[in-house]
Image (cartoon, rainbow, N blue to C red):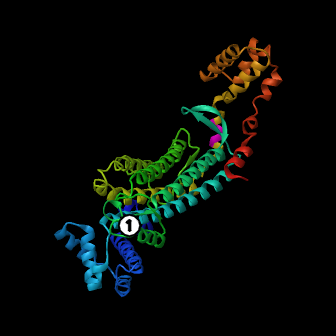
């Protein structure tokens, strides 16, 4: 991923230095387990740990060796032998390359998940704070982009909180599913390595054992993991799109914070554009675009092939780095979002109370009018307001069919916006459990 959309802590998980350190730890832990079984000398394992634990693996040297041998794990083992000496011959006993590569990917994805979960926690905290701040800030709800009935801006944010809480739960489950260890040797039969070695390495690396690895960890696990990242990205885009709509000039109910000295356009000095949320929309597309290759990686040939390898070398770092950046950016947007309650109220009032049309529909049916007649009566008066001919309550009072069922006092009483907000507390209790 390019530096513009990267954060160091996540990038470090995918660095060559980190990868080779994990490779060494897996190999060294396996050697320890082998020594306990008497397969290799215990003193050899001690040398491996002593010389390799704090070694600075030379990435350029490993790359140089790989250019000759055309095999990344062999290149690493060759470099390790240069560091460790003769005892390195006991490393990788009974193992195959996928044991190292797949287990390492599991470690990296688990560590990446921990950062992403922390990112979501920060976003949830920001959403909760702003939701309570605007719990009673009335605004018009929209369906199809058209005025519907009132809600509150706090309820909008509570919805986002509930959605990202689900995202967090999915990610926790995906982390658990991806964090498995495979040290089972060629075609996964443990023919040349005891299953207890796998159990030991898994424990040391904070992983669960893979029940049947077939030489590679089954890629349905990875497909579910990246699909989960894709869903989280879609949730990011959902909230980002809402903010973008609210920032439109004709709406201007909320907008991204515009800092001192910030410029919105190279040509038009007046512009204040929703650049952060537009950026988030694009980043979400990227993350979702990595889901399909992960799904296609599931169907490998027989016990293994490496058609998945090139894909994962890209989508592993890129998807997690991009999502990490996007979650942090969205948190910043929410924390600093500028909200305009007065514009929300003004926009809601533009249609002169038409958002109460359902109340009159129901009131007329309860007063004895059929639903079809009630709908027709309310709609024909509402359409006059749409055409700018006058005020909704005036038309309702002047309509003989309506006035025969509802008094002027009843009509006036139905234009109470608080009616729409009477269950906001219930919604908040359901979302936040308070």
Dot 1 alpha-carbon crowd within 10 angstroms: few under 14, some 14 to 19, many 20 or more: many
109 inside magenta stretch: no
**Residue 375: x and y, percent?**
67, 18
In the rendered image, which residue does mark 1 sit on? 183
Residue at x-position 42% and y-position 63%: 106
Left or right placement of residue 426 versus residue 51 in this view: right
In the image, residue 384 above or below residue 68: above
In front of the other: 362 or 50: 50
- Element marked by disc 1: loop
How many discs mark residues in the rendered view? 1
Q: Quadrant of the N terminus?
A: bottom left
User: Where does the magenta region start and end?
Assistant: 343-347
Q: Residue 24 in the image: state x and y as whole percent.
A: 36, 75
Residue 85 in sight in this render: no
- Kindly identify the residue that appears in the image at 54 percent across and 33 percent down: 145
Which quarter of the figure has residue 93? bottom left
Does residue 56 appear to the left or right of 236 in the view shown?
A: left
**Side of 247 relative to 136 (left or right):** left
Q: Nearer the viewer, residue 20 or 241?
A: 20
Which secondary structure dominates the residues rendered in magenta? helix
**Where 40 sits versus 119, above or below?**
below
Residue most extreme to the top: 400
**Residue 356 x, y percent position in the rendering:** 70, 28
Q: Nearer the viewer, residue 245 or 49?
A: 49
Q: Is residue 424 visible?
A: yes
- State the image coordinates of residue 161 (x, y, percent, origin top left): 60, 50
């Amino acid at each position: 991923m390019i530096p513009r959309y990267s954060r160091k802590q996540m990038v470090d998980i995918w660095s060559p230095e980190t990868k080779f350190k994990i490779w060494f730890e897996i190999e060294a832990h396996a050697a320890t387990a082998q020594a306990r079984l008497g397969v290799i000398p215990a003193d050899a394992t001690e040398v491996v740990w002593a010389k390799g634990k704090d070694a600075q693996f030379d990435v350029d040297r490993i790359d140089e060796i790989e250019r000759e041998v055309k095999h990344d794990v062999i290149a690493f083992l060759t470099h390790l032998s240069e560091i460790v000496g003769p005892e390195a011959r006991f490393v990788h006993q009974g193992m195959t390359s996928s044991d190292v590569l797949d287990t390492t990917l599991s470690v990296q994805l688990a560590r990446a998940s921990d950062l992403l979960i922390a990112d979501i926690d920060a976003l949830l905290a920001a959403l909760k704070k702003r939701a309570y701040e605007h719990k009673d800030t009335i605004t018009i709800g929209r369906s199809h982009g058209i005025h519907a009935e009132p809600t509150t801006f706090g309820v909008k944010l509570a919805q986002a909180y509930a959605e990202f809480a689900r995202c967090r739960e999915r990610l926790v489950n995906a982390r658990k599913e991806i964090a498995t260890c495979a040290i089972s040797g060629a075609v996964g039969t443990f023919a040349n390595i005891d299953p207890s070695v796998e159990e030991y390495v898994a424990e040391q690396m904070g992983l669960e054992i893979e029940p049947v690895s077939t030489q590679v960890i089954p890629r349905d696990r990875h497909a579910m993991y990246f699909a989960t990242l894709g869903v989280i990205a879609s949730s990011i885009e959902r909230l980002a799109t809402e903010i973008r709509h609210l920032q439109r000039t004709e709406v201007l109910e909320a907008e991204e914070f515009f800092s001192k000295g910030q410029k919105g356009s190279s040509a038009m000095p007046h512009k204040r554009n929703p650049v952060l949320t537009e950026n988030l929309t694009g980043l979400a597309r990227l993350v979702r675009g990595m889901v399909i290759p992960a799904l296609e990686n599931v169907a490998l040939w027989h016990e293994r092939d490496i058609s998945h390898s090139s894909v994962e070398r890209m989508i592993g770092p890129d998807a997690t780095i991009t999502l990490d950046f996007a979650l942090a950016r969205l948190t910043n947007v929410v924390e600093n979002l500028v909200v305009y309650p007065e514009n929300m109220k003004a926009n809601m009032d533009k249609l002169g109370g038409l958002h109460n049309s359902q109340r009159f529909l129901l009131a007329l049916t309860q007063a004895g009018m059929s639903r079809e007649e009630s709908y027709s009566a309310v709609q024909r008066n509402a359409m006059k307001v749409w055409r700018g001919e006058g005020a909704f309550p005036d038309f309702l009072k002047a309509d003989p069919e309506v006035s025969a069922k509802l008094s002027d006092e009843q009509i006036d009483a139905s234009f109470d916006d608080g009616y729409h907000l009477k269950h906001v507390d219930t919604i908040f209790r359901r979302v936040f459990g308070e």
